[in-house]
Image (tube, grey):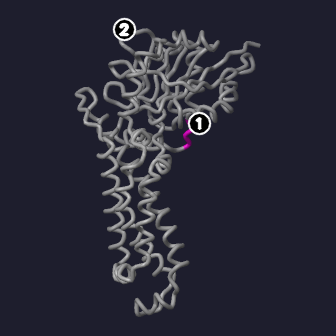
Amino acid sequence: MQTLTVGVLADPGLPEKVARRVAEDLPGALYQRTGPEVSWEVEVSRETLPLTAEGDIPLLDKADALREAHGWDCVVYLTDLPRDHDGDPMLCEVSAGAAAALVSLPSLGADHFSRKACRLMAALVGEIRSGAGRRPSPSAVHEALGRRAVRRVSPAGDGDASYVVLPGWMNRLRLLVGMVLSNRPGRLLPALASCVAAAAATGAFGIFYASIWNMSDALSPVRLAMVSLVVTAALSGWLIFHNNLWNRTRGAEEPWRAGADNASTVITVWLSVAMMYVLLWAMLFVVGLAVIEAGYLESQLGHPVNLFDYLQLAWLAASLGTLAGALGSNFDSDEAIREATYSRREHQRRQLADTYDD
């Protein structure tokens, strides 16, 4: 029985997590394709490949060296960077001659992430082994994803590389969702520790003022919801512009990329602020219940109170605290916050190109 080893290179973060989950199921998926004559082994390595000056990931150029260095028979690279080919989101590129494939995870969207990645990688490795990388049918990719994919062949003289793209506005929307997921909004909360502290202190201070009680009682839930949207949007905007997260690049060849980068950054930061807001609201609700006696609150509001009155009070106090969080954000780690943007990560990988070979 022949034993073949698939090496999975993965960027740090979500790609590495997906790679380690896929590594458990990939041998079985490959066994179903090849049968008992081949025994498959999968090894995962955390590694970031650089970007060229043209913005490409030179996996196919470095595949021979990577396979030789690790003792792999073929290599699959999982990246969290969005890729494109002729203006359409690119899911993967594969070359049977180089025994290598690249998968851009954001193009998978958000549903059944590891399961789809496993099916897709099994299809790509199967193509590499059969030597069908030049003109394969896209049916295997369609089967893995459950949606239409288009295969494009590299120009003559560029080897046997082929590309799978996902055209259409729905696929661009899935790409945006995948980019936000790769950004991992929850990881920004520890980076906003000073912001959260300032928001909590200001919100808790507002709990003790009778004027805040009366104001929260007078505002309707719709009005409070509008206030919440305004303050979370204001703090999100401050974090984006204060930390230079906005991508001002205007590429003629791929004008949608800057827009996708900025949209994913805005959504990621807003979701992080919204998470902070919900946590702040819950904390202030508990503080309000512990500090403000119900009878005294009734005497101030002039009517019987229930849990909803405490929720409204915490709601307004959380909004006031969130505005004050912008001041605390000045003391947070700029570098950690900037990791939420793709343009920043692409810049770091371009710098890596000068030292990668060494």
Label 1: few (<14), some (14–19) or many (≥20) C-alpha neighbours in 10 Å? some
Residue 156's mark? 2
Which of the image's four quarters has the N terminus?
top right
Label 2 SS: loop
Mark pair 2, 1: CA separation: 37 Å
Which residue reaches farthest top?
Answer: 157
Residue 184 in the image, given as x and y percentages of width and height? 48, 44
Q: Is residue 317 left or right of residue 38?
A: left
Looking at the picture, tell me which residue is in the foreground, 229 or 329: 329
Mark 2 vs 1, N-terminal side: 1
Q: Quadrant of residue 87?
A: top left
Q: Which residues are magenta?
A: 112-116
Q: Mark 2 belongs to which amino acid?
A: Ala
Magenta span includes 216 = no
Q: Circle 1 sits on which residue?
A: 17
What secondary structure is the magenta-colored segment mainly?
A: helix
